[in-house]
Image: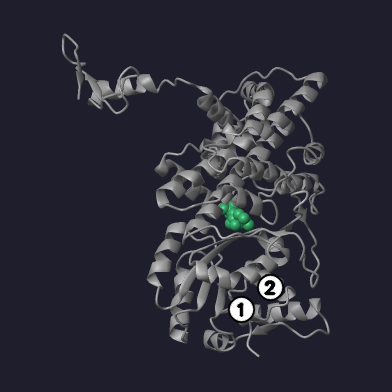
Amino acid sequence: NLNDIGVIGLGVMGKNLALNIADNQYHVSAFDLDPVKVNGVIQQEKQERAGLEPRILGCANLTEMLASLTKPRILVLSVPAGAPVDGVCSALISAGIESDDIVIDTGNSLWTDTVEREARYKGQFVFFSSAVSGGEVGARFGPSLMPSGDIDAWHHVAPIWKAIAAKVDSSTGLPIERFEPGNPVTEGEPCTTYIGPAGSGHYVKMVHNGIEYADMQLICEAYQMLHDGLGMSAAEVGDVFKRWNKGSLNSYLMGISAEVLKQADPLTGKPLVEMILDKAGQKGTGLWTAVSSLQIGCPAPTIAEAVYARAVSTQKSLRLQLSQKLAGPNAPAIDEAQKAQLIEALESALYCAKVCCYAQGFQLMAMTAHEQKWQLNFAEIAKIWRAGCIIRATFLQSITQSYEDNAELSNLLMADSFASALSEKQGLWRIAVATAVMQGIPAPCISSALAYYDSYRCETLPANLLQGQRDFFGAHTFERIDTPAGEKYHLDWSAKERTLAKV
Ligand code: 6PG
């Protein structure tokens, strides 16, 4: 009997994907260069489904794996992005992979690499990709999956992908969560949809991660304001986050942040968060999002600030020196009544800033889709982020609704529901930002989002002066407000008698 699917790379994600696929009745062949990992997944399945017929077969090499699979073969790659992906592809070619076999890259690959790979491996096998979000638990019990590439390959893979994806209750839009080995969620709407041509799925996942970076940083800024500004303990801030998590700020990230803040350090008994070194790591997807936004000219300042915030955090020794050297404000004391108001203001600020970072991410996807001629369906993308992925939040249901109402929405701030919510809350948002400024507490994401909001509110920006400056020193020309678009003018700035010329 041949198996349905092969999983190559049995690290945290690959192992859990294999177990998830097996839970959903499929027979899996599993391979890793490290035989200990192959044995690990076999043993785990044995433990979890004791006494039952195993559905995971360990393979000693790729030739054995290929021989164990039904044709056309489906092979899931779960290896680090970059060179390892091509390494496995070459090894598969040597092992005899066939032209209609499908290789699915599930790592956080750079989307342009995926585009190149589809072309490079054409004729040897079908290079398909599916970004995966949801970390270890997601991979095991239901991730959000963003597949893209050859459409026939998708039809082939879709039943398995729909089975293993996270599920949403279609009447409430909320995740159906059950974390029980051997008892997968089979009801509800699966969090996977065909995204588009090669590279588009990884692009969408990259932007998901950019939003993830910004969302995480926003929560961190709120923590710093409540902790350093209002003198609350980590556990008290955790309680505030728990409360917020019951309202419009409900999200997976808010929930885990509350848990982290309330956790005591097993070694010292102090709040664990205060024992964790304040240097943030990153693997690159947030940076790629920021770079892409700069390249295409899509304003995404909140996402970029989140990447910078991680960079500043890593410069600990410089921060230590400057903390002794640079003056801060004489912050006015905050009394109990103000404290309650500020907590309320911060909740609104966080909501508004969050809407802006999603607005930035979705506009970025729209601009790139236009450039790449991808037909992205934003309502579907918002839908598959409602469960399984790291940025899952009840709020995604409102985004889904906005794009269902108007698929051509140029920016989420144009949706009536978000425009009125932000208009109503912007006063409190300003109080939160002003307080952070007066207290000397950095809030780069909350405040850059406000600048983004205010920039888009401006009918006239000082870019008129900027164009004047450019024309002054470089004869870069400018358009006028009273002549047809595209007509360029230059003022002869260096002449004694300055004259205006149409160029
Ligand atoms: C997900 C995550 C996942 C991972 C990233 C972010 O959607 O499941 O985004 O892909 O956590 O690698 O990692 P960094 O914070 O290290 O960049």
In primary-sequence order, the first of circles 2 and 1 is 1
Q: What residue type is labelled 1?
A: Ile
Q: Mark 1 points at which residue?
A: 5
- Name the residue furthest left: 496
Between residue 330 and residue 162, name the one nearer to us.
Answer: 162
Q: Name the residue under label 2.
A: 21
Which quadrant of the view contains residue 205?
bottom right
Mark 2 in CB contact with mark 1 (< 8 angstroms)? yes
Label 2 crowd bin: few (<14), some (14–19), many (20+), radius 10 Å: many
State which quarter of the image contains the C terminus. Answer: top left
User: Is residue 444 shown to the viewer in this render?
Assistant: no
State which quarter of the image contains the N terminus. Answer: bottom right
Between residue 100 and residue 129, name the one nearer to us.
Answer: 100
Percent of width and height locating residue 244 = 78, 37
Q: What residue type is labelled 2?
A: Ile
Which quadrant of the view contains residue 177?
bottom right
Which quadrant of the view contains residue 135?
bottom right
Quick check: 224 above or below 21?
A: above
Cα gap from disc 2 to disc 1, whole angstroms: 9 Å
